[in-house]
Image: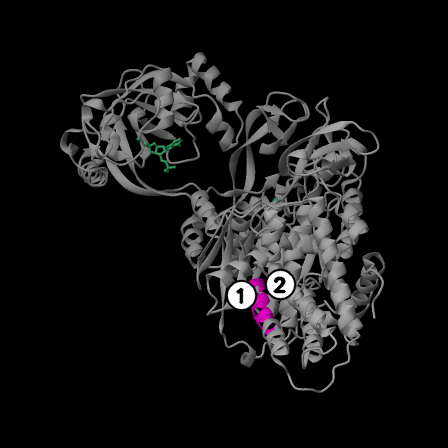
Amino acid sequence: MASERYNAKDVEPRWQKLWAEREIFNTRNDDPRPKFYVLEMFPYPSGRIHMGHVRNYTMGDVLARYKRARGFAVLHPMGWDAFGLPAENAAMQNKVHPREWTYANIATMRDQLKSMGLSLDWSRELATCDPSYYRHQQKMFLDFWKAGLVDRKQSKVNWDPVDQTVLANEQVIDGRGWRSGAEVELRDLTQWFFRIAEQSDVLLEALDSLERWPEKVRTMQRNWIGKSEGMLVRFALEPAGAPAGEGELTCFSTRIDTLFGASFMAIAPDHPLAAKLARDNPALAAFIDECRRIGTSESAIETAEKQGFDTGLRVQHAVDPGISLPVFVANFVLMGYGTGAIFGCPAHDQRDLDFALKYNLPVRPVVLPRGTDEKAFAITDTAYTGPGTMIHSRFLDGLDTEPAWDMMARRLESTTLGGEPQGTRQTNFRLRDWGISRQRYWGCPIPVIHCDVCGPVAVPDSDLPVVLPDDITFDRPGNPLDHHPTWKHVACPRCAAPARRETDTMDTFVDSSWYFARFTNPWLTSAPTDAGDVRRWLPVDQYIGGIEHAILHLLYSRFFARAMTQTGHMDIAEPFAGLFTQGMVVHETYRRSDGGWVEPAQVLITGDGDGRRAHLRGTNEAVEIGAIEKMSKSRKNVVDPDDIIATYGADTARWFMLSDSPPERDVIWTEQGVEGAWRFVQRIWRLIGEISALSPASEEEGSEALALRKTVHRSIVAVENQIERLRFNVAVAQLYELTNAMTAALASNRLDTPPAGLTAALREAGDVLVRLVAPMMPHLGEECWRLLGHDDIVALAAWPLADPALLDDDTVTIPVQLNGKKRTELTIGKTADHKEIEAAALALDIIVQSLEGRPVRRVVVVPQRIVNVVV
Ligand code: ANZ
Ligand code: ZN
C-alpha cells in the first residue's frame, strides 16, 4: 500500500539503472518480430539539452514504447550530429580543442537524455565526428565519385578579406563578416558538388508517394525543387556597341504570354556579356564589383534594393524587330538560374516593376484581370501577376493567358533567328547541385589528393580514413588544415610525385544524410552498411523532428538514399516512410524596467486574469510580463530541463509536454501546467496504491462493474488509436477520463455494500491504466506495476488487449469544442439526449479547466456528431 508521496527523485534513477543493466532497449538485428524504426532527429552537441529536445524525444519515446508493447522489434537509436562551426568558434573563443569541446558536450547531454528515461538503444550510439563513422562517409564519397554523382566545378563563396576565410551564408550579416566586420567579397573557388540537380524530377515526383508526410513539408520541398516550365527566347542584339561575336541574347521566361509588355532586358552581373562589356567600361566594372558585395545568399539578393546599369546595348523584340529594348546589367538577375538573362515585363512582375519605376522604363499592361474594365485598369506600384485576358498584344488580344502562352510558344518555335527557332520550350528547376566543400577544420575530410600530374586522385581504400590531425591551431586566420605544417603534404597515390591533400571538409549536412542507415549496423567496420541490415530496418517508420529541417536535411537524405542505392549501400529510395514535425516550446517573456530580460526561474507570479503580476524573486521589484515566444537564450525565457527534472521528475515533464497541445502546434510551458502534471502523477500513485490493497472476491459482475470494464476497454482502443496517430494530447485526455471513472468507482467500492464485482473490475482497471500510462510516464509505470504485484518490467509487458465483447458499442465518441476549437473528445451513449450530452461535456476535466470559471454562454449539441461549448 502506497501511503507516501511518490518521490520521482528516488524512483527514476533506480529504474533507469535497471533498464540499462538489463539492456532491455537494445535491439538485436536478428529479432524475428516485425520491425518498427522510430527516429528523432539527432541533436547537435551544443552543450545542454533544451526543452525542444525534451518534447521531440518524449514523442518518439512514447511511440517506441508503445510499439514495443504491441510486439514489434523496435529500433530506437540515438547519436550526435557532431561536426560543425560552433566547435570551431568555441575553439577560437575559449582556447579549447573542438574535439574536447564536442565530446564534453556529448557526455553532458547523454546524461541528460538518460535522465529523461528514454527507451534508447545506447549500444548503437554514434558521433559523426568519430573516424569510425566518417571513414565510411569518405568511402561513399569516393563511390559516388566513381559513379558519376560527384562533380568538381567553380562556384562563388563569401570571402572575408580580413579573416582570410570563406564564410557560410549565416556568417554574413548585412554584407559583412560576422567576426571581422569586413565587407564580404564574392570569390570563385573550385569546389566539390553532389549532383543532386539532375535528380530534380525524380525527387519531385516521388513526393507524391510520401503519404505519411505532412502536406506542408511536401509543399516546401516542391517549392525548393522549383519546377518551372518556360521557354528559351532568343533576341537579336542590335550591332551598335555589341562586342565582336555577340549577336544575340537568350533569356528564360515562364511568362512568354507577356512578351508584348517587355520594356527592357536584364542580364546577371556575372553574365559573360557583362564581363566582355566591362573590359572597356570601368563604370560597369565598378558596378559589377558592387553587386558582388551582396554575397551568395539568395535571400540577400532578393531583399537587396534593385540596382541596374544601362549597358547602352539594345535588342530587337523577339516578335517585332521594330521594337527596340535597352539591355541592363541588374543585381536581381542570378547567373545560376535559367540563362542569367531575362526580359523585364514591369506590369506583371514585381521585381521588374520596382526596377522600371527606378529607371523610368515604360510599364505596359498586357494582362487584364477578369471582370476589370480596361479603361479603369492601371498599374501603379503593384504588379498584376495573375491570369486574365490579353490586351495590347496584337495576335494575342482577347485570349486568356493560358492559350495566349501556347500561341506565343508556337509562334516562337516557328519563326527563326539565324536559321534556328526563335524559341524552344524548356523545363527548369530551381534546385542547384549541392556544394559540399567547406574551408574548415571540424568536418569530414574530403578523401582526395591533388597531384600536379594526375589531377585530383582518390585516396586509396587502404588509406582510409583520412583522419583529422589533432595538433592544430586557431591563432591564424584561415583553415587550420591548410596551414598545418605536414598534414597536407603527401605523395600522389598514382605517380608518387609530391602532392597535396584536399584541405576542404564536407558540409555537415552530408553527415546527417545517412546516419539513419548507419544505425542499422553501427558496428560494421568493413563497409558503411550491411545489405541485410538496411533491408531489415529501413525505411524509418516514423521520423520526428523540427520543421526547420523540412527542406535541406530531408532533401539531401532522400538524395543520399538514391545515391547509396546506386552504389550498393542501400536499396531503398525513400528513407523516411512517416514524418512528423513537432511544434516549438514557447514561454512568456519577462523584462525589468531597464529593458533587461529576466529568466522565468527568477520570477514570482501572483494573482491571475487581469490581476496577474510578476516580481523578481527575493526582492519586490516589479517585472513586466511580455509576449509568449519561442524559448531562446536572447530572451532568457528558457526553462532548463535539468531543473524541471530535479524538481518534478522526468515523468512530470514528459506528461506535460504531451498533454497540453496537439503535437504539431507550439506548446506553452507554464509553471501551473507542470504543477498540474505533477499532481496527476501523485493522483495515479494514490489510485494504484488503493487498488493494490483490494482483494477481489469471486462474485457476479453487477452493472456498475460492467460499466467500469466497458470504460476501461474502450480506453484501451482510444489510447492506442490516438498514439498511432501521434495525437498524444488526445490520448492524455482519454487517460484523464479513465482515471476519473476509476476514482468514482473506488468511491462506490468504499460503500458499506459495494456494487457486485467492482473490486475485480478495479483491479483489472489498475492493470490496464498502468500499461496505458507507462509509455508516457515510464518510471511511474514501473513503480505502479510493482505495486500491483507484478514482478516483471512494465516496459516489456504486452499492451492490454481490448475485449471486443465490451466494446460493441452503444456509445459514440464525438469531438468537443470550446469556442469552435476542438479540445477533447467525449464518449457517450448513442441514445443520450441533448441534456445528457451537454452535462457530460461540461463535466470533462479539460473543459472545466479551460473554462477557468468563466460562465458558459451556450452549448451547441449535434447528437452523435459534435459539441461546442461557447463562452
Ligand atoms: C518574363 C516575365 C514576365 C517573367 C512576367 C515573369 C513575369 P520561376 O517561376 O522561378 O522559374 N527569371 C528567369 N531567369 C532569371 C534569373 N536568372 N534571375 C532572376 N530572374 C529570372 O521564374 C521564372 C521567371 O523568373 C522568368 O519569367 C523570368 O522572368 C525570371 F510578367 O520572364 B519572367
Ligand atoms: Zn600523380
User: Does the beta carbon at disc 1 come under 8 Å from ligand 1?
Assistant: no
> Which residue, given by chain and number where applicable, does mark 1 sit on?
827
Q: Which mark is residue 737?
A: 2
Q: Contact, CB < 8 Å: mark 2 with mark 1?
A: yes
Reply yes or no: does residue 182 show up in magenta.
no
Q: Quadrant of ligand 1?
A: top left
- Residue type for callout 1: Thr
Is 858 situated above or below 388? below
Residue 646, horizontal then vertical, whole percent: 81, 50
Label 2 neighbour load within 10 Å: few <14, some 14-19, many 20+: many
Residue placed most toward the observer, 254 or 541: 541
Q: Earlier in the sequence, mark 2 or mark 1?
A: 2
Is 802 situated above or below 864? below
Could you tell me which secondary element the residue under label 1 belongs to? Answer: strand
Residue 746, horizontal then vertical, whole percent: 71, 70
Rendered image quadrant of residue 791: bottom right
Tell me, yes or no, if residue 404 can be seen here: yes
Residue 622, horizontal then vertical, whole percent: 75, 28
Reply yes or no: does residue 715 show up in magenta.
yes
- Residue type for callout 2: Glu
Main SS of the magenta part reads helix
Which stretch is magenta? 713-723
Picture quarter with the N terminus: bottom right
The reply, left or right, for residue 178 in relation to residue 605 is left
Residue 168, horizontal then vertical, whole percent: 60, 34
